Amino acid sequence: MAAVLPGPYRVAEMAATCVAMATTAAHSLLSVRGGRPTPFTVHIGHAAEAFRSERHTRVVGEAPRPLWAPLSGDYRAADGWVRLHGNYPHHAAAIRRALGADPTPEVARRPAVEVEDVVLAEGGAAGAMRTREDWLTTGPGAAIREEPLVARELLGDASPAPLAPADVPLAGVRVLDLTHVIAGPVCGRVLAAHGADVLHVTPPQWPVLLDLVRDTDFGKRQCIADLGDELRALVAGADVVIESFRPESLARKGFGPADLAVMRPGVIVVSIDAYGHTGPWRSRRGFDSIVQMSCGIAAHAGLDRPRPLPAQALDHGTGWLAAQAVMTALRRRATEGGSWHLRLSLARTGEWLHDLGRQDDGDVAEVDPTPWLTETASDFGRLTHLRVPHASVDLPGPRKPGRDPATWW
């Protein structure tokens, strides 16, 4: 059978599995609340294109915008390849400090790992291309292989929190979205698609990639709040908190998972990071394209240059897995109680993708996404976008950061 997406990895199958898992969790929750789930069948093409949703979201009548900033990309180093990520202004500035205004000649004269190190030292994001063998014999790779796909930890005691009868799986569930880029925001979007009240919080002066907000913030409200009393008040009213800061960074400000469980007993905290929570790279910054380079996904079949996945599959997969884990935890909390911490990482999702095996890379029949495209009004204008597969509700369009007050409704 022809592959739906190109490349040797089973990205389309991964996408369909993630959509099926999340939809099943939503239907299970709906059954508990007295609703009547309808049978569903996941279309692998729709799921695959959902993993590329940012490519389909655009203002009606406008041409697609580039996904990558000028400094972002793969660079040939003295002994291999390295990827630089400069989509955020502060990360682009770190690249320029480390390598100059044009990184190409400076990268070319240095080993890839040295380039990675100097960019990281300046506060940037970079990843040298490693083989699978290199990755699995290092501390980070070995540690991540030992982590579960979704780690679950009981943070503290809390009374059971039964969910009232409803005809939508997540009706009345409040989700505080403290995430950015793709994985965390996708989790929030999936939860909104099943009826949750999702409030996306951006700290003051935090850089925002508006093109990604346009894609991932369907169904959410948008506010600006500092990491202080405003956020504490929001946490006190939340059922779920999703965060994608580097491990320990929120804890240093008094908003770590244990702190959140004290502020709001019964809370479900979701932490998403790049390189897991146990190994030597647990605090290293990274993005999907960087992790693909680090963990051997981009280096395969003896190619002379990196070959990225046909989607930001580690981001999207992690987001959908996180949403499924949240809905499962809500059902468990309804009968057992407790405050819970769910941890996922892009690198661990990458290991799962690797374990799904390979496909024939020579026969590809990509699907036409038109049947799943629609138009919705938004703060950015009328948008063409891909519908969330098997959504329980119609989602309003995305709102601009700061559009709403920092309060629950």
Image (tube, rainbow, N blue to C red):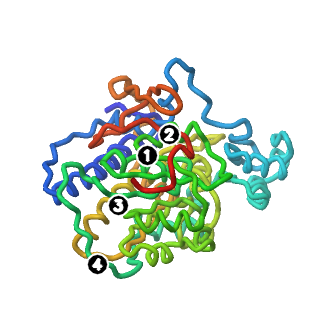
- Residue furthest bottom in the image: 157
Q: Nearer the viewer, mark 2 or mark 3?
A: 2
Q: Nearer the viewer, residue 161 or 125?
A: 161
Residue receiving disc 2: 399
Q: Nearer the viewer, mark 3 or mark 1?
A: 1
Q: Position of residue 189 (x, y in %)?
A: 41, 46
Q: Are marks 3 and 4 in contact (CB under 8 Å)?
A: no
Q: Nearer the viewer, residue 108 or 42?
A: 42
Is 32 situated above or below 215? below
The local crowd at label 2, few if under 14, some if 14 to 19, many if 20 or more residues have their Cα within 10 Å, is many
User: Which secondary structure lies at badge 4?
Assistant: loop
Q: Earlier in the sequence, mark 1 or mark 2?
A: 1
Residue 159 got which mark?
A: 4
User: Which secondary structure lies at badge 2?
Assistant: loop
Q: Quadrant of the N terminus?
A: top left
Q: Earlier in the sequence, mark 3 or mark 1?
A: 1
- Label 3 is placed on what type of residue? Ala
- Label 4 is placed on what type of residue? Ser
Spatial CA span between label 3 and label 4: 20 Å
User: Which secondary structure lies at badge 1?
Assistant: strand
Residue 325 got which mark?
A: 3
Spatial CA span between label 2 and label 3: 26 Å
